[in-house]
Amino acid sequence: MGSDMVRLGITGGIGSGKSYISQILTGMGVPVYDTDSQAKRLMTENESIRADLIDLLGENVYEQGRLNKVLLAGYLFASPENALRINRIVHPRVKEDFCRWALRREAEGRKIVAIESAILFEAGFEDVADVTVMVHAPLEVRVVRTIERDHVTAEQVKKRIASQMDDEEKCRRADFIIENDGVRQVEPQLRKLFQALKNRKGGL
């Protein structure tokens, strides 16, 4: 991308532990851009997103300057087409925001940054990553983790997993895979990743 900085794209299915990996990366000095929280922020702050959402859903999509999450969710989950319309509004702005954020981190002297997204490939966020990393865990482990975290049933978790891109496809498309099965330690795997990045770049 015309820069010495390496942009990692971190992804993984529900319950894989990608946020846990991101926390470890942050502790290792790698800034992580969380697309989920940043998208929510941008839907309130970004004037272009606000204008497009109002065009699509009407003035009621914002109440007293705040996003009407009930109205938005009702539209978003009504059909895949509706979700696509929202994503076409939000995802390009998230990409732009990440690129600006990464440039600021580079100006601070950072050599590696990361963008975390459950839908890295689906949303096209891989386009702004130099190297993609898939956080993988067995299905049964993911189900247990999500039940404990979200207090939902196994059936609900499996339904959510079924709606996401298949893990095998994500693993196939990713440059690196981190196994987060609760048995293998992840820190040595991340150190191996960093070594591979240094070898690619000729030293970071």
Image: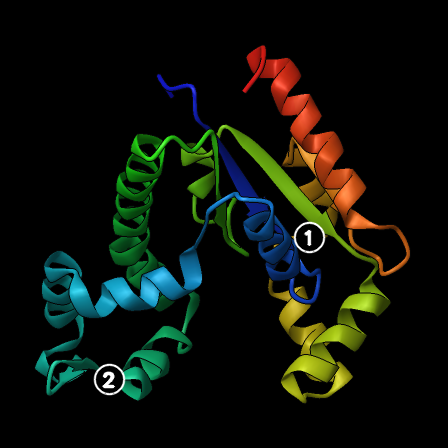
Q: Quarter holding the C terminus?
A: top right
Check the image and tell me how it is coloured. rainbow
Residue 91, position as x, y percentages in the image? 33, 52
Label tally: 2
Q: Give the residue at mark 2.
A: 68
Residue drawn 27% across the image and 85% down it:
71
Res. 178 image quadrant:
top right
Q: Give the residue at mark 1.
A: 166
Residue 54, position as x, y percentages in the image? 12, 71
Q: Is residue 194 left or right of residue 108?
A: right
- Secondary element at tag 2: loop
Q: Is residue 204 left or right of residue 193?
A: left
Q: Earlier in the sequence, mark 1 or mark 2?
A: 2
Res. 34 image quadrant:
bottom left
Callout 2 crowding tier (Cα within 10 Å): few <14, some 14–19, many ≥20: some
In the image, 101 versus 176, the foreground residue is 101
Q: Are marks 1 and 2 in contact (CB under 8 Å)?
A: no
Depicted 95 relative to depicted 166: above or below: above
Residue drawn 64% across the image and 53% down it:
24
Q: From mark 1 to mark 2, how far is it between C-alphas?
A: 31 Å
Residue drawn 64% across the image and 36% down it:
174
Callout 1 crowding tier (Cα within 10 Å): few <14, some 14–19, many ≥20: few
Residue 108, position as x, y percentages in the image? 33, 35
Q: Residue furthest top?
A: 202
Q: Quarter holding the N terminus?
A: top left
Q: Amino acid at mark 1?
A: Asp
Q: Amino acid at mark 2?
A: Asn
- Mark nearest the camera among 1 and 2 is 2
Res. 56 image quadrant:
bottom left
Residue 193, position as x, y percentages in the image? 69, 32
